[in-house]
Image (cartoon, grey):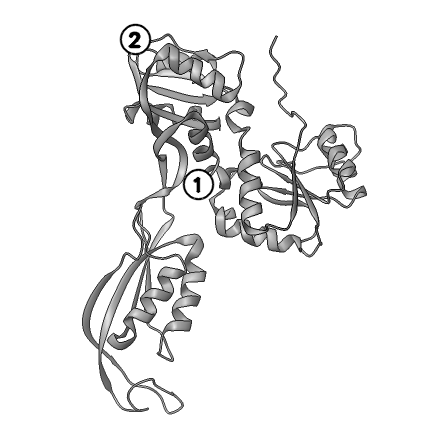
Amino acid sequence: MKLQDLLDAFELVAPGSLQEQYDNSGLQIGSPMQEVTKGLICLDVTPEVVREAVENGCDLILTHHPLLFKGLKKITGQNAVGQVVIDAIKNNIAIVSVHTNLDNIQHGVNEKLGTVIGLKNLRILQPKKGLLQKLVTFCPGSHANQVRSAIFEAGAGKIGDYDSCSFNLEGTGTFRGGETANPFVGKPKELHYEPEVRIETIVPSYLLDVVLKAMFKSHPYEEVAYDIYPLENHFAQVGSGMIGQLEVPLSAIDFLDNIKSSLKIPYLRHTRLLGNTIKDVAFCGGSGSFLLENAIASGAQVFITGDLKFHQFFEAEGKILLIDAGHYETEQFTKDLLYELVNKKFSKFALLISGVNTNPVKYF
């Protein structure tokens, strides 16, 4: 398949517009028109991973963490990033990253982690704002169902666990077409009054163009009247971290044992035990220390993430059980997630999960 097909598929699942400003998700090396036949999935691209790709005949590396975060002034092979660039280009291997845009979606990195831990009722811990817009259009009552169905199918009208959400109001529209107009109802140069339905619904900003295209195609009018309003609502399906519940509450000791076992970690860094029972668990794969206050405010008894600094343990003291389970360890299952997403869309595309352990942190 063409690399662009894969990029388009990820744009529907984890749109690039959802990545954080500092991020560099997307195509790192290669051409969108490049044909790819076999992919290797990893968390980080290292020279060892590239060698693994070459040995297995892979012409695509799909990684969670971007290879390129900063501009390169020299490509000499004297550091790991430069060597990867040289080796990938030499062997015609494309590199694609799906990073914080995969972190920020509901069915992304954190949901995968929560499932491994054994949590249910998963929801976003810190939903994002400014990603929703209200779409309003007007059409004859005879075509209201047709227009609604089209925009719902394109992704509009979803609120939480509900879909096909809209508000509809009947009224009268007026218009007068010019001499060259070809109106659906009425006659050119004559003022026309038409019973219409005002349809209001909600649309994620990254789906707006797709929804508008579906609306125009399904709408009977030659000129479609519509309004778009920016919203400041929180978008419950997009954001950072997650919170969920254990099926059966556990003591803190048993919970720590469960985390070590689930994530295959020899040691855990954590604050002192508070003597309470663990039921509600907040967590964030990778570096989630910025969510500590959200975790405390959520009422969770524990917050799990990685890359915690010394003084952040003081901030949690007496308020919540804080666990540093490691950056790599809390994101290791992202490889399985990427495999599932690609295989679901392109079931005949050959895929391998890298066997190289790219965790730079070792335990003694």
Residue depicted at x 29% and y 27%: 298
Mark drawn on residue 34:
none
Residue 9 pos. (x, y %)? 55, 52
Q: Earlier in the sequence, mark 2 or mark 1?
A: 1
Question: Looking at numbered disc 1 in the image, what kind of residue is underneath it?
Answer: His
- Report the front residue among 198 and 348: 348
- Report the front residue among 331 and 295: 331
Residue 204 pos. (x, y %)? 39, 52
- Report the front residue among 67 and 351: 351
Q: Give the labeled residue for mark 2.
A: 275
Residue 305 pos. (x, y %)? 45, 23
Q: Find numbered disc 1 in the image and state the secondary structure of the residue it sits on.
A: loop
Q: Is residue 98 visible?
A: no
Q: Give the labeled residue for mark 1.
A: 107
Left or right of residue 244, residue 333 in this image: right
**Picture quadrant where residue 168 is located:** bottom left
Callout 1 crowding tier (Cα within 10 Å): few <14, some 14–19, many ≥20: some
Q: Quadrant of the C terminus?
A: top right
Left or right of residue 195, residue 258 in this image: right
Q: Find numbered disc 2 in the image and state the secondary structure of the residue it sits on.
A: loop
Q: CA distance from mark 2 to mark 1?
A: 33 Å
Question: Looking at numbered disc 2 in the image, what kind of residue is underneath it?
Answer: Gly
- Report the front residue among 51 and 234: 51
